Amino acid sequence: MKIQDIQAIKLLLASPKKIAIIPHRGPDGDAMGSTLALYHFLLKNNHQPTVIAPNDFPDFLAWLPGSETVRIFEKDTENCTTILQESELIFTLDFNALHRVGEMEHTLAKLTAPFIMIDHHQKPDDYAAYTYSDTSFGSTCEMIYNFILFLDKKEDLDKTIATCIYTGILTDSGSFRFPKTTGNTHRIVAELIDLGAENTEIPVLLFDNSSYSRLQLLGRALQNMKVFEEHKTSYTSLTQNELDSFNYVKGDTEGIVNYGLSIKGIIFTAIFIENKDEKIIKISFRSQDGFDVNQFARDHFNGGGHINAAGGKSEVSMEETLKKFEDLVTKLKI
Ligand code: 5GP
Ligand code: MN
């Protein structure tokens, strides 16, 4: 982050302020971890922060400290709009283009308070007065840790903040496995554990709290998987009917996409999930090595993300979407 920006932000935070903190739509562990870590940090510094999520977060994140204070724009639009209009500073975390907040974009676009973006995705838009954007980081949470240090507030780090930061680093790094996990990531994680982050308990809360029906849904997704060995690609799909028949709740499909990469020789995978309410097929892409799924998602499925993890959507039927994907895959030279 630029020295001038750090100085300017220090000045902004020198007096108590009403501050809105916003994660992207469909908030994940990194989005919720980073917004809540910043929330606790700002609270400690006598500000009045509010986390406003565009839509609800999954149950497996509901144990995060402070999650009970999070406002959901989609459910409580009027109050959230008032809070946003009264905010003197707006943080947007874990995304870098305003359309990533869905309907809330129209409200955000009209605000006059300065924005601070902290994010690790590619190609940031230019909406923030202060931008801390760096694609070399595996998570926004790792950047929040640095941000607190930039502000010379290391002594404010405590068990609560450490727990939130640990969660985002853990989830966005695929449990410390993805390539952007560095020695420095581990040094930060070591410090978070020393501060009290429960490193054996947190993964249980996040990953081992499954319902029986969720495990059965995973089984269905694995059965639906198709493999294109020649093109080093696999994919799977879940229709709304399949989700319904396994009593789907938000968060149940989290992480399923990664199984497609666990097949020997596969370096590109995708999961297509039907959402009848939104009339879309939501897609997650994952890759390893140099195959750029961010570019693939941008080029073909109205999406984006990172080189090895991206998302997108399709507004045609599941059948047509899968046909389009298969046609693209058979032309791929990976
Ligand atoms: P996931 O597959 O876990 O939903 O998302 C993987 C990554 O891609 C995340 O970093 C997420 O922010 C990004 N992403 C997911 N969906 C979209 C999308 O529709 N548009 C863009 N630009 N990024 C997305
Ligand atoms: Mn992230």
Image (cartoon, rainbow, N blue to C red):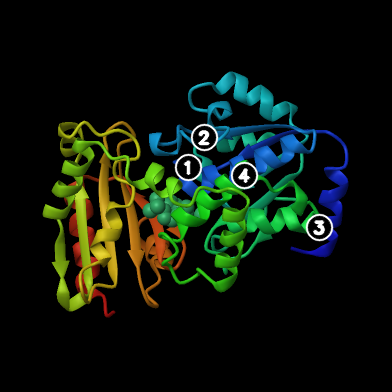
Q: Name the residue under label 4.
A: 159
Nearest the viewer among 68 and 318 is 68
Q: Which residue is drawn at 83% across and 43% down?
A: 13
Q: Residue at x 37, y 77 (%)?
A: 289
Q: Is mark 2 on a helix, strand or loop?
A: loop
207, above or below 259, in the image: above
Q: Quadrant of residue 14?
A: top right
2 and 1 marks in contact (CB < 8 Å):
yes
First in residue order: circle 1 vs circle 4:
1
Residue 266 pos. (x, y %) = 24, 72
Q: Name the residue under label 3.
A: 5
13, above or below 80, in the image: below
Residue 73 pos. (x, y %) = 54, 28
Q: In which quarter of the image is residue 194?
A: bottom right
Nearest the viewer among 94 and 47 is 47
Which amino acid, mark 2?
Pro
Residue 43 circle label: none
First in residue order: circle 4 vs circle 2:
2
Whether residue 31 can be seen here: yes
Which amino acid, mark 1?
Pro
81, above or below 137, in the image: above
Which amino acid, mark 3?
Asp
First in residue order: circle 3 vs circle 2:
3
